Amino acid sequence: MLKMKRIILSMLCLTACISLMAQNISGKLVDEAQQPLPYANVVLQTVDSAFVTGTTTGEKGEFKLQKIVAGDYRLAISSIGYQSLYLSLQGFERTADVGTLTLADASQELGEVTVTAFSRVSRADQKLIFPSKKQISASNNGVDMLRHLMLPRLRVNSMDGSVGMTDGSSVQLCINGRKATKEEVTALLPEEVIRVEFQEDPGLRYGDAGAVINYIVRRYEVGGSFGYNGMQSLKSGFGNHNLTGKVNFKQSEISFYYGNRLQYFNEIWFDKNETFTFEDGSQYHRSQYAEANKKKNLQQWGAVTYNLQETDKYMLNATVGFSHYNDPDLRMKGKLYTEEFPNSVTDREEWNHDRNLSPYLDLYFQKNLKHKQFLALNVVGTYINTKNRSSYTELLSGEPVVDYYSGIRGKKYSLIGEGVYEKAFKNGGKLSAGVRHTQGYTDNDYNGTLQYSSQMKQADTYAYAQYNGKWGKLGYRLGMGVTRSWFQQIGQEDYETYSLNPRLNLTYAFNDQWSISLNGNVNTMNPSLSQLSAVEQLTDSLQSERGNPNLKPYSYYRSTFRLNYSKGKWDIGLRNQYNYRDKAIMPHIYREDDRFVHSYANHSSFQDWTVGLDGRVGMLWNVLQLSGSIESRKYWSNGIDFRHTQHSIGWDVAATFMYKNFTASVEFQHNSDYFFGEVLATGEEAHAIDLQYRWKRLNVGLRMFNPFQKDYKRNEEDWNKYAGYSYQYHIDDVARMICVTLSWNINFGRDYKSNNKKMQNSDTDAGVL
């Protein structure tokens, strides 16, 4: 009897453990016209095709498989008149929604879809990533989650949270299909993220963005959430802090976020060597050595949002937000030495105080129309108030020989309006069209040594149409955009230009492992208001800065070829990218009235060519993932009076180890040099080591930046023949800087299916030189 009790007790314990480990798989099935497919067969199999469990889709195409134990599986989906779809689920360990899946008509060939490590669904044109429990547990916020997902060709700065591509192109962040800022993504609670959609070379609506990252997040019908995540240095005043919260009731949601970044460094200094060449060929060599000084600035941002929606019908979203930047007191003191006059050593003092405040109002409305049509409207109003003060003094034997002062008060008003229309067709194609107009007015007053008043008006209109389709295994996206640019500055002639922006994207999947893509597009690059300003600012005794009202928009041609291999835990990609900028706006230095004037001009051309190899593998043994990349980059810069070439190699490697509640990661980066015009910025050497422990909803850790450097420095060179220089900037506090990381998130409520806001616009160009 005692033995029988032990057996029964063991079986009960085993059953309880299996129940605790059981997870669910859910999703929705539609046809190529995006209509629900009811009564389709959904079968879960082992990797050797043995039956595990199964179900059929409901009236709305939905399905759910419950109580699935962690393991490796294959999901087989079939329906009469349609081609079967197979998803490989390797390393399945957590409840997940695979989203909306499309069955191809039986007369067409099946598009390739693969799910690996149950973290990613790889298609020729897009990746769907399902964060694992460990990745969610290790993440402090939405941006931090990208570090642990290790998406190919994506680079996340663990110090300031910036996100970009390895080729230098920008990334458009989105939340539930709506364009979002980095601050909004930072405010996301990791456990709210269902999946992440990653698409390179997106459509015309995203302009020159190199990729789009879309977070699909849960919405609550009742209750709410609150969270804090931050990082604080133990060595200096450097720190990032973020608060977020939301409350839900039926169809309404009120949310907020607030964040700040304090940069307080105890020791910064620079060394600069300059060579000035005059009209007669004579030269003047000057060296600047700055003493160690302190630097302090504060950035703040925040927003409150009200959202009202009825699922599958409409959504109204209203946001009031602000951003604020304050750099109150930057003082740089040092010595000026000249090779030609070694006995005349000049004391140099520079002081800057910058402040920028920008409130904004964002109104958004979307509605689903009949016959698979969609319409969205967005209006954003922004006000930017700028106050800058600076002074520059050169003292010889205690007497000032140069003494400049500048004060700037700037106001900018802008209004951005955008409309988007989409129509899905029965053959699986989709037509997208949109128009965006930006209207801006800037009023800047410059006082001090030089006084000037500048009023500028700018209007940009962009309209586009695009069609997405598929022909067998070949997917294509064809589009054309038209850009109108208009600019007027009081006292100067205005200009108006029109340009075409075509785009072509082709993807072909050979099988479930190999795919290629070819992308080409032409973007219009407009000069900024600060570049167009006719204002001149004195820099020192020899130099000044000046805008150029005669600048014109230029065309930016981009082409990219990619070869991708994805199987199981492996993801490898080869990329070849060539960019050409015709009449590129680049810095221009010339002599005028015994000064070297630093301005801008439309130069002949600028080209760059990059070849790179990227790889990722994980999770190995369900605890380790690795990533790395290496690239070769070459530049050709052809200007009005110069011609330069430059080549560099960059690489990075990263590893993340996750075991139970512990997470350890390490990153090494040797970035490629960045060259533009005549200025070379050498690639940054950056390292980071991260250790974290999670206890319930509290995540505590230590992060060390640049542990193998005694001194953090950045090098820059200007190859200009009139006023070239070599510059080295040091920040002692960034080397071997140890930070405490902390995140604490709580939430309550239940799932609620939400609509997707499709856009968000913003204006950050203050128009101040």
Image (spheres, grey):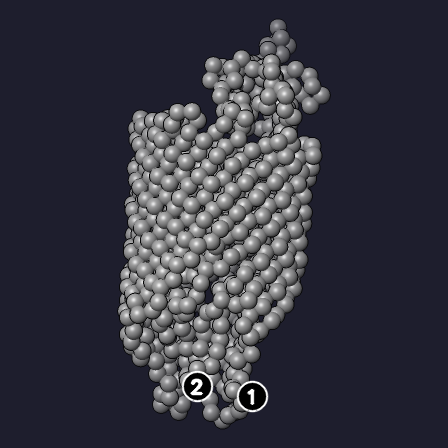
Image-based side of 213 in relation to 449, left or right: right
Residue 57 picture location, percent across and down: 52, 16
* Residue type at tag 1: Gly
Residue 352: image quadrant is bottom left
Residue 374 picture location, percent across and down: 40, 31
Real-space Cα separation, disc 1 to disc 2, in angstroms: 14 Å
Identify the residue position indicated by label 1 in the image: 281
The answer to which of 344 and 36 lies nearer the viewer is 36
* Residue type at tag 2: Asp
Image-based side of 719 in relation to 569, left or right: left
Residue 714: image quadrant is bottom right
Residue 206 picture location, percent across and down: 47, 46
Q: Is residue 337 visible?
A: yes
Q: Upstream in the sequence, badge 1 or badge 2?
A: 1
Image-based side of 608 in relation to 425, left or right: right
Residue 112 picture location, percent across and down: 64, 30
Q: Which residue does the image show at 52% across and 68% down from the upper left?
A: 603
Around disc 2, counting alpha carbons within 10 Å, would you say few (fewer than 14), some (14 to 19), or many (20 or more)?
few
Identify the residue position indicated by label 2 in the image: 594
